[in-house]
């Protein structure tokens, strides 16, 4: 299992109660950038949550991932406003530059590209979110610059 001390530290922040499962999973996801399966199982056991329910939560929320993600998570908004303003071309350019597809992570674990339905910033369309920093009005020729490849 991942670093047991880190996991126990996360668990110690919350009551050992099933109602703590979402917060614990959020902290684990923040710590590792994904939810290692054995850690989800351990947290579920410690909190008295059926493993099936813990995995149901882990797969329901888009903020969680059961696959390792890169240090830099790039979210390309594919909502209507962004789509109309060129989100597809931006996603294609990111995939070309990083040599990975949407939903994939580079071999060096540096970048992950995620396509999301909406980031709630339609006035800034098209939007790319890089580790929670919003970049609006993104053009394909600016993609290199915003990911630091220029």
Image: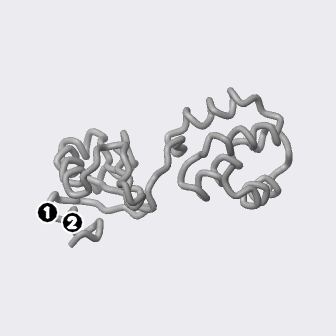
At a point 65% along the width and 52% down the height, the residue shown is 28
Give the CA separation, mark 2 to mark 1: 7 Å
Image quarter for residue 144? bottom left
Residues 3 and 46: in front is 3
Q: Is residue 134 left or right of residue 57?
A: left
User: In the displayed structure, would residue 65 be above or below residue 27?
Assistant: above
User: In the displayed structure, would residue 140 be above or below residue 149?
Assistant: above
How many numbered badges does the structure rendering display?
2
At a point 39% along the width and 60% down the height, the residue shown is 108
Q: Is residue 35 left or right of residue 80?
A: right
Residue carrying label 2: 144
The quarter in which the C terminus is drawn is bottom left
Q: How busy is the neighbourhood of tag 2: few (under 14 within 10 Å), some, or many (20 plus)?
A: some
Residue carrying label 1: 141
For mark 2, give the secondary structure: helix
Q: Do the residues bearing badges 2 and 1 touch, measured as CB atoms within 8 Å?
A: yes
Closer to the eye: label 2 or 1: 2
Outermost residue on the right side: it is: 16
Residues 62 and 98: in front is 98
Residues 134 and 16: in front is 16
At a point 37% along the width and 55% down the height, the residue shown is 107
Q: How busy is the neighbourhood of tag 1: few (under 14 within 10 Å), some, or many (20 plus)?
A: few
Q: Position of residue 102 (x, y in %)?
A: 31, 43
Outermost residue on the left side: it is: 141
């Amino acid at each position: 299992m991942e670093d047991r001390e880190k996991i126990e530290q996360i668990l110690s922040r919350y009551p050992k109660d099933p109602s703590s499962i979402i917060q614990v999973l959020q902290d684990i996801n923040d710590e590792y950038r994904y939810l290692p399966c054995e850690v989800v199982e351990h947290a579920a056991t410690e909190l008295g949550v059926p493993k099936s329910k813990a995995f149901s939560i882990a797969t329901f929320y888009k903020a969680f991932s059961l696959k390792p993600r890169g240090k830099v998570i790039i979210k390309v908004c594919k909502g209507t406003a962004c789509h109309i303003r060129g989100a597809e071309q931006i996603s294609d350019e990111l995939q070309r530059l990083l040599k990975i597809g949407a939903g994939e992570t580079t071999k060096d674990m540096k970048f992950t590209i995620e396509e999301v339905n909406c980031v709630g910033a339609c006035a800034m369309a098209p939007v790319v979110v890089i580790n929670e920093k919003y970049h609006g009005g993104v053009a394909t020729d600016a993609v290199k610059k915003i990911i630091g490849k220029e």
